[in-house]
Amino acid sequence: MNKLNIALFGYDSYTGQLPRYREGFEQLGHKLTFENPDIIYANDPTGYKSAIELKNTFGKSCLILHFLDIPWHHKNVNHWINNVTSALNFANAVCVNSEKVKNDLIKYFSKKELHVTYDISKDVYLNDKIIKNNDFLYVGRANDPVKRINLVKESLKLIPEKLEKIKICGTENPGFGNYIGLINDEELNKLYNETYFVMLPSKNEGIGLSMIEGMICGSVPILCSDNLTAMEFAPKEFICEPDPKSIKNKIEEIKNDYKNYRELALKYGKKYKIQFNKKTIENNIIEIYKNTKIY
């Protein structure tokens, strides 16, 4: 296929997806430009307004809007949904993170087909030369109540001498454990590979990339049964009830047969290394463009 002109919008930060899309499209040989783009792609609602304005300027462009998730904790979630779905009406095509997000969104927005294209994982990979020496890792926002990091705290209190040793990566310090802040992909890859358990007790996730990235690197995620995304992407063996005792018991169950559970994580991770790769996802977006009627 001929190389395309692509305009990208969205949250432009290491913790966001936009830098990964930019790198991936350039690696595929496409040109990133706001002049006469073939594709206008906004990865999240922060970029919708600018993307729609550019579409109005270049009518022949294919406007693809990507929907991450519904923020159920938002104090006025219905108003938020109305605003976002109004913007989605302008799109030629709409993409979503997961089947779970698709099923949530379709209740409020059924005017267009929803394409599941996932999110791009960080550049992590299995490195068997790295020796596991870290018990627990948490990656993500700590102050978001939906993330339920307090479940991590309360469950590790039940395991002697583990609470203050958990390593926590992200922009927010929860006030316990070994907080190491925001780190780059290379450092994060090393940390995933040397970790036994990745903790993801969230009640809701669009995907939960730490779960995906952990399995790619041979770390076992600990997940909760009321998180439908965990049910979509992880084996049931890694899922427990959302209470501290159940989490503690799941950790001990897996620890007693860790080699086999790690092999199960790697089985899923091998598939996700391809499925969540930037080139795979961006080629899927280009296929959507090729099969979408422009108006």
Image (cartoon, rainbow, N blue to C red):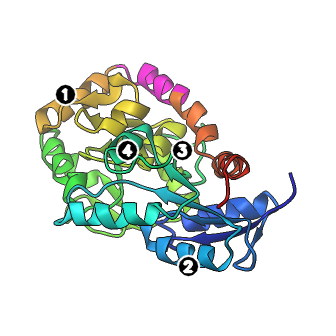
Q: Is residue 126 visible?
A: no
The residue segment tinted magenta is 257-267
* Label annotation for residue 115: 3
Q: Secondary structure at mark 4?
A: loop
Q: Is residue 258 above or below residue 183?
A: above
Which x, y percent locates residue 106? 37, 44
**Residue drawn where x is 25% and y is 53% of the image:** 147
Q: Which residue is mark 1?
A: 249
Q: Is residue 101 above or below residue 29?
A: above
Q: Disc 2 residue type?
A: Glu
In the picture, measured across the screen, residue 86 lies left or right of residue 201, that is right
User: Mark 4 to mark 2: distance in Å?
Assistant: 25 Å
Q: Is residue 3 visible?
A: yes
Number of the front mark, 1 or 2: 2
User: Mark 4 to mark 1: distance in Å?
Assistant: 36 Å
Q: Disc 1 residue type?
A: Asn
User: Mark 1 to mark 2: distance in Å?
Assistant: 52 Å
Q: Which residue is mark 4?
A: 106
**Residue drawn where x is 60% and y is 44% of the image:** 125
User: Mark 4 to mark 3: distance in Å?
Assistant: 11 Å
Q: Which residue is mark 2?
A: 53
**Residue drawn where x is 43% and y is 33% of the image:** 233
